[in-house]
Image (cartoon, coloured by chain):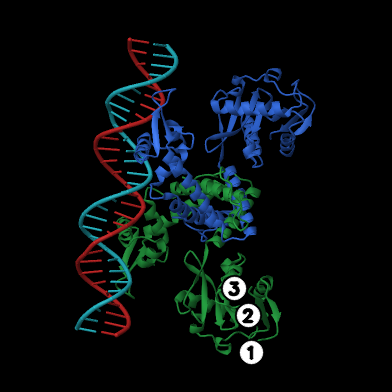
Chain colours: A green, B blue, C red, D cyan
Amino acid sequence: MDPEAGGTRPRADDPAGPSREVVDQVRRFNRAVTQRAGALQDAFLARGRPLGEARLLWEIGPDGADVRALRSRLELDSGYLSRLLRSLQHDGLVRVEPSAADRRVRTARLTKAGLAERAILDRRADELAGTILRPLTGGQRARLASAMSEVQRLLDASAIRLRPADPRQPDARACIGAYFSELAQRFPGGFEPARSTQVGDDELTPPAGLLLLATLHGRPVGCGALKLHQDAPAEVKRMWISPAVRGLGVGRRLLAELERRAAASGATTARLETNGTLTEAIALYRSAGYREVPAFNDEPYAQHWFEKGLS
Amino acid sequence: MDPEAGGTRPRADDPAGPSREVVDQVRRFNRAVTQRAGALQDAFLARGRPLGEARLLWEIGPDGADVRALRSRLELDSGYLSRLLRSLQHDGLVRVEPSAADRRVRTARLTKAGLAERAILDRRADELAGTILRPLTGGQRARLASAMSEVQRLLDASAIRLRPADPRQPDARACIGAYFSELAQRFPGGFEPARSTQVGDDELTPPAGLLLLATLHGRPVGCGALKLHQDAPAEVKRMWISPAVRGLGVGRRLLAELERRAAASGATTARLETNGTLTEAIALYRSAGYREVPAFNDEPYAQHWFEKGLS
DNA sequence: TCCATTCTCTGACTAAAGTCAGAGAATGGA
DNA sequence: TCCATTCTCTGACTTTAGTCAGAGAATGGA
């Protein structure tokens, strides 16, 4: 059930909001594509088995998976998941054993028959794509793939959420770690955190500072932080975006949100320093209104210092 | 459950088939859109009511609908539909009465409360689109709308089916009627079927001829016909595509299928005549390999005659 | 008038997709 | 050792999305 464009009600004239025709296009897409594709897909992949079971079979994967990981990934009730596994086990497609690392945990693995069934599902998914593509010309196929990629990427961009996080949390740690790894790879002389100006976890925790995490469907895909000072400029730190979501405006959004929060904390100026190798980051800062200024600290890995008024 | 790209199996080297990466893109899209967008949509529109009921509420619409029309449109079992209506009736949202035209038939109408509930659904669908669009920049929104439109149109193109039909059937009649209407509008002097060279229904019915219908999700969107002659060229007739699906290669597909069937019936040549006003049709024929030839009949409304070898 | 067809509804039922409660085992920190 | 927490499983159950059978009323054509 997808209500189509509700064309009887004009959109409020909000310059920051989406226009009527864009909203209508999204609604039309929701109706036409989401539902139809879903029904077609379900029909294609069912194979006489409940979809929940088929889905689980696929998610267990060729390497197996812990039940709790499956529970969390598929967002299923422990009881229901147990039942689905029982059913697949009964059909000889799955084997469930206690994990060696923690005997409370079960690990599910596909049997030989389970792997064969999964391969059939794989083929079926290919066939489904084939039925969609076959009636089209070569040019139409390329255009469809390109448009689908664009829709998908923009829906991802839309789904990215920003939230404050404690720098000690695993997700935050992972992002900062990825940031440091990338710096080590891209700087000509490498990067060692110990040689850089130290920033403690407390400094990025309210009220002294703040770390923002960007997540896509719960998965961390970026971070950025603020060091706040009384009567002095706020410092932007730890700006990193996962390569998987670059080009989608996430960095810009993160930076804008950091600026907002800095201003809300009373800061009138934001500052940051960066290495000359990070050309895309520098371009982002410039286009966001940062001007290059004389060095304001002695960070060994920096060659450029930027500042922006926050009014 | 959406299997993602099954990247371990190389695609057969079939130049006419879709490439591996296009198939993978379609599979990724199916996964991303169907599951995520579908689930989000259901959550948004549920409002504590089963989706089937919400869907029915929407489909009844502001003007009401016959139960049998709803049954056919939504492809629901008569018993189940009756139950859904009962439930909505119990909630005071729907009124069901015998139709004046045929007392076997029931007409369902929304009550005042039903109309209010429908308006809420309308608003919710807007809000759903809004949540998708709001995190995006203006440029991203425009790009998303454009990409969605492209995906939708190409999926429509993909979903179009060609099938033989009896020219007397309502769908065929509707297409031929639309064709004649368009000719009447576009020809400078108008068009009257009676002044044109007559083609009887039997002439477009096997074995004397053939009519092909193009349908999109069961709805007729185009037609084309053949008149077959022993030891003489086959004639292409009644080529019409609905404006809603023009530009998607449907005409080309129809024409190609007619040629195939003509060749399969032993014809070595295909012929057609057309009015000079139909510039897109002429362009299609030319690009499909038809050459202009001297007039081979005295069709009063034609100014161009074309021919193509079918080997 | 008869009869085949169409339509809606009710009875009876099923399968799938879950939820909630709670028991028992395992883990790790105080 | 104790205890809070985590994990899985089983019991019991519900809701949703339907299906199939068949009855009774209405329609239209022979």
- Subunit of mark 1? A
**Which secondary structure, mark 1?**
loop
Q: Is residue A49 left or right of residue B234?
A: left
Q: Nearer the viewer, mark 1 or mark 3?
A: 3
> Quick one: label 1, few (<14), some, or many (20+) residues within 10 Å?
few
Note whether A263 is above or below B273 in the view shown: below
> Quick one: label 2, few (<14), some, or many (20+) residues within 10 Å?
many
Instruction: From the top left corner, tell me how far across and down residue A178 is, in percent.
Output: 54, 76
Instruction: From the top left corner, tell me how far across and down residue B193 is, in percent.
Output: 68, 20
Q: Which mark is residue B118?
A: none
- For disc 1, the marked residue is A298
Q: Nearer the viewer, mark 3 or mark 2?
A: 3
Q: Which mark is residue A272?
A: 2
Question: Based on the displayed image, in which of its 4 quarters is residue B80 positioned?
Answer: top left
Q: Which residue occupies 59% across, 80% down?
A: A234
Q: Is residue A46 left or right of residue B137?
A: left
Q: Amino acid at mark 2?
A: Leu
**Which secondary structure, mark 3?**
helix
Q: Is residue B300 left or right of residue B146?
A: right
Instruction: From the top left corner, tell me how far across and down residue B242 is, in percent.
Output: 63, 35
- Tell me, yes or no, if residue B56 can be seen here: no
Going from N to C along the chain, the mark reached first, 1 or 3, is: 3
Question: Do marks 1 and 2 share a chain?
Answer: yes
